Image (tube, rainbow, N blue to C red):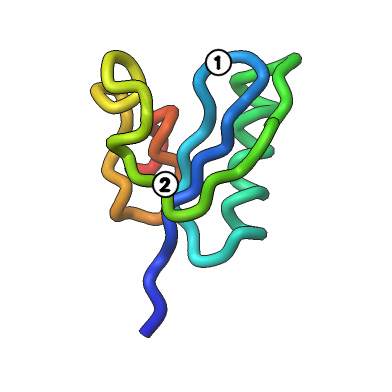
């Protein structure tokens, strides 16, 4: 059985958007919705699939993110 993947979308402003999704397309859709709602004026500047959360900002992103094991947006923390 397939498992969802963790995606990180670095943004031109702010840290980025973290999403767990079944497909890259689903993850991009969720990230673009968050971008439009919370990060107006920012752009997604890349994508990292299967991001290791240890590579993320340890002082702001990691303490403020939701659980990465649930499908949804975990940074900003919106998946529960």
On the picture, is 31 further left or further right than 43? Answer: left
Using the rendered view, name the quadrant where residue 36 is placed.
top right
Figure quadrant of the C terminus: top left
Q: In this view, does 59 lie above or below 67?
A: above
Q: Is residue 33 above or below residue 63?
A: below
Q: Which residue is drawn at 39% across and 39% down?
A: 74
Q: Residue 55 carries which label?
A: none
Q: What is the distance, in whole Å, between disc 2 and disc 1 at their CAs?
A: 18 Å
Return the x and y of residue 59 as percentages of the image width and height: 28, 14
Return the x and y of residue 4 as percentages of the image width and height: 41, 65
Mark 2 Cα-neighbour bin, 10 Å: few <14, some 14–19, many ≥20: some
Q: Which residue is drawn at 65% across and 38% down?
A: 46
On the picture, is 45 further left or further right than 8? Answer: right
Using the rendered view, name the quadrant where residue 14 is placed.
top right
Which circle, 2 or 1, is nearer the viewer? 2
Q: Which residue is drawn at 29% across and 54% down?
A: 69
Residue that mark 1 sits on: 14
Mark 1 Cα-neighbour bin, 10 Å: few <14, some 14–19, many ≥20: few
Residue that mark 2 sits on: 51
Q: Residue at x 28, y 36 (%)?
A: 54
SS of the residue under disc 1 = loop
Using the rendered view, name the quadrant where residue 5 is placed.
bottom left
């Amino acid at each position: 059985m397939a498992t969802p993947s963790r995606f990180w979308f670095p943004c031109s402003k702010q840290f980025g958007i973290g999403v767990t999704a079944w497909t890259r397309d689903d993850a991009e859709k969720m990230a673009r919705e968050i971008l439009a709602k919370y990060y107006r004026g920012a752009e997604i500047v890349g994508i990292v699939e299967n991001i290791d959360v240890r590579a993320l900002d340890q002082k702001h992103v990691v303490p403020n993110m939701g659980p990465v094991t649930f499908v949804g947006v975990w940074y900003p923390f919106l998946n529960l």
